[in-house]
Image (spheres, grey):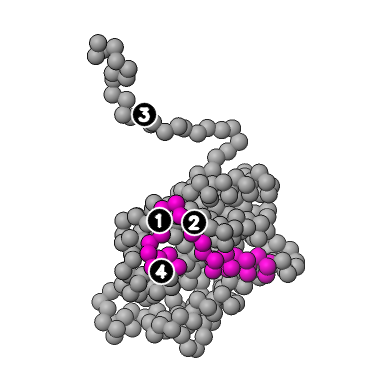
Amino acid sequence: MNNRAFRVDDNSINSFTPSYAGTQGAIATHSNLSATTAHSILKEDKGNAFDAAAGAVLVESLVNPQMFGMGGEGVMILKPSAKSPIVLNGNTISPNNFNFLNLVTKGHREIPDQGILTAGVPSAFSSIFRLLQYYGKLDFRTIAKYAKSYAQNGFPIHYGIVNQKKFGLNDLKLKFKNEWNDSYKLYINKKIPEINSLFKNKKFGDLLDYLSNYEKKLTGNRINRFNKIHDAFYKGDIAQTIISIPIKEMDCFKDRTLTITLLLLKRQSLKILVIIKYIKLIFGDKV
């Protein structure tokens, strides 16, 4: 009778989850919210794949803060139609005034693993702006409306935000409380949120709303408009807010140049295709 049993042979190599197939393309993201955002941008807003990617990245930064955020980086491999692959280098670099001797005088023998002394200028937004500027069809406010809605109206807290090892709220609770007070107030306050409970990040929504409303006032061609919205983040009130944190260790950030470069993948080597933009941030005298 054993030989007649269903699935006698080892079948562990086969997946028990359904596979997905289609004929028009595919969207692959971590969160279903970012995936449906990308689909809506393609189908309802009539955007292209780059518009959809930009919108999905904004949502991912909101719903997966333990993995990625707008304070980080955004390196992308792009494949325009009928063109060779292109790398959008959204890496940050160390501050212009960084000096290892300053770390030594503060008692460090090497660059710390975390904290303000390891940070560079947030480059994820720059990557999104440049992606849309050169390859997208839609404006920023169209692709940002989905992340703005989730930030203002809420999204379900998932297991990873709470329980991811080393980076979930359970493991970071004491660090937030003792060092990152704003993060503690936002994510925890009196208790860690329950999984599937509705969570809102209104300040992130306000940021997207500010940039969207600013964009409405802009005129000129696409290149010029995105240069201006880029400056609105990196040279305007947003930048001043970022660098107004009263931490003495931020002295090295007073003068900062961030270079965003497009690289061409060709013959198994990276060659500079074009330097998109040099952004010079003049930080305030007092930080």
Q: Quadrant of residue 208?
A: bottom right
Task: Quickly name the residue at label 1.
Answer: 194
Residue at left 73%, top 69%?
217
Are there few (<14), some (14-19), or many (20+) residues within 10 Å of tag 4?
some
The earlier-in-sequence mark between 1 and 4 is 4
Q: Secondary structure at mark 2?
A: strand
Q: Secondary structure at mark 3?
A: loop
The spot of residue 9 in percent (x, y) is 28, 20
The earlier-in-sequence mark between 2 and 4 is 4
Q: Residue furthest bottom?
A: 285
The numbered dot on residue 198 is 2
Residue at left 49%, top 79%?
243
> Who is closer to the viewer here, 29 or 199?
199
Q: Secondary structure at mark 1?
A: loop
The residue segment tinted magenta is: 186-215
Task: Quickly name the residue at label 4.
Answer: 189
Query: Separation of disc 3 and disc 2 at Cα?
Result: 35 Å
